[in-house]
Image (spheres, rainbow, N blue to C red):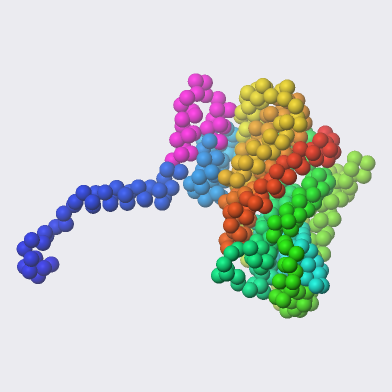
Amino acid sequence: MVDTYAADPKVPLLPIHTESTSTTNTSSVLNSIIANKYIQIASGPVACTAILLFVNEPSSSWSMLAVLAWVFLWWLTEAVPMAVTSMSPLFLFPLFGVSSADDVVKAYMDDVISLVLGSFILALAIEHYNIHIRLALNITSLFCGDPLNPPLLLLGICGTTAFVSMWMQNTAAAVMMIEVANGILQRLPDRSQELGSNTDVQCFCKAVILGVIYSAAIGGMSTITGTGVNLILVGMWQSYFPQEEPISFSSWFMFGFPLAIILFFVLWIVLCLLYCSRSMGRSLSVYLDRSHLKRELELLGPMDFAEKMILVIFGGLIVLWMTRSITNEIPGWGALFHNNVRDGTVSVMMATVLFIIPNKRNKGEKLMDWNKCKKLPWNIILLLGAGFAIADGVHTSGLANELSDSLSFVKTAPYIAIAPLACLISATLTEFTSNNSTSTLVLPLLIGLARSMSVHPLLLMVPGAIGAEFAFLLPTGTPSNAVGFATGHIEIKDMIKVGLPLKVAGVALITVLMPTLGEKLENSKS
């Protein structure tokens, strides 16, 4: 520095702070605030404080509303990780007098949570032994056709995805099946550099990826364990109406499966009309046929003892779920235990069996060990617990009654108009926030609305919950959509082109099915 100064006396010994430096510092501070999400973090406490300041007579219901504002703003803005937001009721409820610490903790571990926990462990076992890949290749090769029939192959891929999604969470099913789909699509040539985007290869790639992500969502609607939204619905029904019979796996299946089947074929028809041309079979048969799929199966080798046992346990779990409670005339095996057993009991029991039976691959090794369970999605489990805690808080704080009174103006509105509206509102909100967050927000409002209209709560809760699963338009709607979008085969316009008619068909189906199949679900709970 001395040499520099000696060479040029005009060079200052200390840096001079110019206006541009000040501007840079200001910009740096703003960037830091934005990057660290300080505005989003502050939005929750500020909204909570604002609600409490403008209340003339503080009460537990207003405290609950303030806490709701805090939690939902953090969920919507992703100020902190979703799992952390999901734990916030554990300290917010006791601090604001909504409920005691002991009461709020109980919501984070009940029968529904145990149902999810056992199902996740079984899903991890299926993933570990690549049973999903074997299943996908078998079914896809069955539907491939000889010569190649693209619509039929598309039906096989989508059908497999929907079936897998019935028994595990949508995102897990979508991730698994996207890998299988990519394995099939990698056999096709890369046409990305060609002019135009209307080639048979590109259209088939679009159809497959869209089919996988939407089939995962549709398949999950048919069972309680298929999606978090259904679990939240079941948990809130149990929380708000403990005197009523819980929604069992079999009773929901009788409603959800026909709905999913119809919506699935609507999806398949839309994909075929938009993306499957008559010349596609000839174009793709050069690169893809049944022999390719059989070669993949041969590389997997024959099923060993471990894989067979996983399938036996999986099949046994489904049978136990379906037969625990059948009808009023045929009570099911649950009656042998005085109906103290629930679906969560069976789920954890069968998951425990995985840690007892040896896999016969390595000496002393069982079908599952706890190291394999490190991938358990605790964020989903905590989110479900938060949803149930919020449902309890809305009910016990008296906020549900106040919401019901404020909605008295719709008492005279016909149900045929309110049910599709509830479904449409959920279907719109779910494009901008997660399915689970949407259902957690909307379901307590619909319970209050049902009381105001003097209709059975399930007749509004079910459309609201199912509507939250119609996130078909944007990549940000669900993690499954994001996984499909990340493959690079589809664009937002493709999602809108397929998702919009699918969403309209879904709302129409709910409107038609609720007074019919939905009434049977209602009667089984009354």
| Span colored in magenta | 42-68
Residue found at x 63% / y 63% = 198
Q: Position of residue 54 (x, y in %)?
A: 47, 24
**Residue 104 sits above or below residue 6 on the image:** above
Q: Of residues 148 and 404, which is closer to you in this image?
A: 148
The reply to whether residue 490 is visible in this rendering is: yes
Q: Most extreme residue toward the right, as rendered? A: 329
User: Residue 46: percent from the left, percent from the top?
Assistant: 45, 35
- Write the residue at 54% across / 44% down: 75
Q: Quadrant of residue 330?
A: top right
| Whole-percent x, y for residue 485 in the image | 59, 58
- Residue 145 in the figure: left or right of residue 2: right
Question: Looking at the image, which is closer to me, 520 or 402?
Answer: 520
- Residue 482 point in image, percent of width and height: 59, 56
Q: Residue at x 55, y 49 (%)?
A: 82
Between residues 44 and 413, which one lies in front from this camera angle? 413
Q: Is residue 59 above or below residue 126?
A: above
Is residue 52 a member of the stretch shown in magenta? yes
Res. 173 visible in picture: no
Quadrant where the image shows the N terminus: bottom left
Q: Residue at x 78, y 53 (%)?
A: 265
Is most of the magenta stretch helix, strand or loop? helix
**What is the count of numbered marks?**
0
